[in-house]
Amino acid sequence: MLKFASAYRVKPVRAVGEHLPFKDETFDFILMTVIICFLDSPEEAILEAMRVLRYRGELAVCIVPRDSSWGREYMKKGEGSHIFYRHAHFYALREIK
C-alpha cells in the first residue's frame, strides 16, 4: 500500500497506531476504518489519535460490529484460520463508545 500511495503523489508514512510519528495537534480529521479489530491496544491507538488531533478536530472510527452479519461472518472465518481474520478481535458498538 505504501508503493500504491506513492504512485498517486501521496506521501505515505509507515507507523503503528499506538505510536504515531506526528506532533501534537497536527490533524483536523482522523479516519480509522476497520482497523480497531486488528490492533493490539485499541485504547492506546485512540488516545494517540486524540493526541494528534487539533482542538475541535474529529475522529471517525468505523468498525464491523461483532453482532452484525458481517461481524459473525468474519469471526467464523477467523475460527477457520483465515490469514487476516484469525488475528482480529471484533467489538460491539457499545464497547467502542
Image: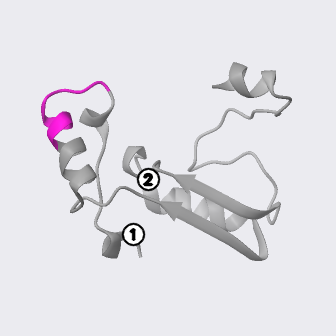
Q: Quadrant of residue 48?
A: bottom right
Q: Position of residue 89 (x, y in %)?
A: 28, 49
Alpha carbon separation for disc pair 2 and 1: 9 Å
- Residue type (three-letter) at the residue carrying disc 1: Ile
Question: Observer-nearest residue: 82 or 46?
Answer: 82
Q: Are marks 2 and 1 in contact (CB under 8 Å)?
A: yes
* Secondary structure type for disc 2: helix
Numbered label attached to residue 73: none
| 84 vs 42: above or below | above
Callout 2: 10 Å neighbours few (<14), some, many (20+)? many
Label 1 sits on residue:
96
Image quadrant holding the C terminus, namely: bottom left
Label 2 sits on residue:
36
Q: Which residues are magenta?
A: 76-83
Q: Position of residue 52 (x, y in %)?
A: 74, 62
Q: Quadrant of residue 94?
A: bottom left
Magenta residue check for 78: yes
Residue 41 located left or right of residue 52: left
- Residue type (three-letter) at the residue carrying disc 2: Ile
Q: Position of residue 84 (x, y in %)?
A: 33, 30
Lower sequence index among marks 2 and 1: 2
